[in-house]
Image (cartoon, rainbow, N blue to C red):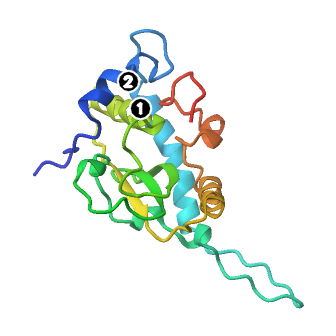
Amino acid sequence: MTTDYQPFLLSDQDLRAADVSWAYNRSAGGAIALGELQAWKQRVASYQAKVQAAPQVEQGNLFAAITPPTAADTLDPFSLPPQNAEFWRGQFQESGVPALYFVVDHEVPLLLYVGETIKSNQRWQGVHDCKRYILSYVEAHRVHRLPVAVNIGFWPHAAADRKVRQGLEQALIRRWRSPFNKENWAMWSTPFVGSKLEG
């Protein structure tokens, strides 16, 4: 088995619909340079490795009870069982459960995107901007013959209440600074989301 095997992530329809000319935010015909790609990944991965390795900070207070860590503090996106992003094409008996999901390049490792859903088995049906970002990211690796292993992992313990679920999603986006989430585009100068500001 080769180490650079990558399952197909997007449907033919998604490939036809995606215009990769904007993908690298470069001049026409120019893909992201190898050094730039590697430096970008290293910056993000270094930040996330520090987040993962950091002990939980608890501020002491003589007059208050210690606040227990929240799911945003303890949830490790890299430990979730990975699934191919085409998982939703399977035949499911149920629509799924409220969940948070994480798009991860396990080759690095690098958390690319954090999302939330009420129906985990149906989340990626249809159009989703993150599918295009993944396509651009994977293509950038293929151009330079670099290994890449982008998968999705679900945390099926999210609240059914949408506001609560979205609150946890935002806390995780802030904690991990996932570069495909629009909240962090400026921080990382994310080259895979294009010039359109969509999310």
Where, by quadrant of the figure, is residue 198 drawn? top right
Q: CA distance from mark 1 to mark 2?
A: 6 Å
Residue nearest the viewer, comparing 170 with 121: 121
Please provide percent x and percent y for residue 107: 33, 50
- Indicate the quadrant where residue 195 lies: top right
- Would you place residue 81 above or below residue 111 in this image? below
Please tell me whether residue 67 is drawn above or below residue 191 in the rendered image.
below
Looking at the picture, how far across and down is residue 99, in whole percent? 47, 62
Residue 86 falls left or right of residue 194: left
Give the left or right position of residue 146, taking residue 113 as reference: left
**Image coords of residue 101 (percent x, y):** 45, 56
On residue 18, the disc is 2
Q: How many marks?
A: 2
- In this picture, residue 123 sits left or right of residue 65: left
Residue tagged by mark 1?
A: 132
Q: Amino acid at mark 2?
A: Ala
Which of 169/107 is in front? Answer: 169
Neighbour class for label 1 at 10 Å: few (<14), some, many (≥20)?
many
- Give the residue displayed 62% in from the left and 62% down from the top: 168
x, y (%) of residue 117? 49, 55
Residue furthest out toward the top: 28
* Element marked by disc 1: helix
Residue at 41%, 58% (x, y): give it.
120
Label 2 Cα neighbours within 10 Å, binned few <14 / some 14-19 / many ≥20: some
Say which mark, if any, is on residue 197: none
User: Sequence-wise, which precedes: disc 1 or disc 2?
Assistant: 2
Task: Mark 1 and mark 2 in contact? Answer it, CB < 8 Å.
Answer: yes
Name which residue lies at 88% across and 90% down: 62
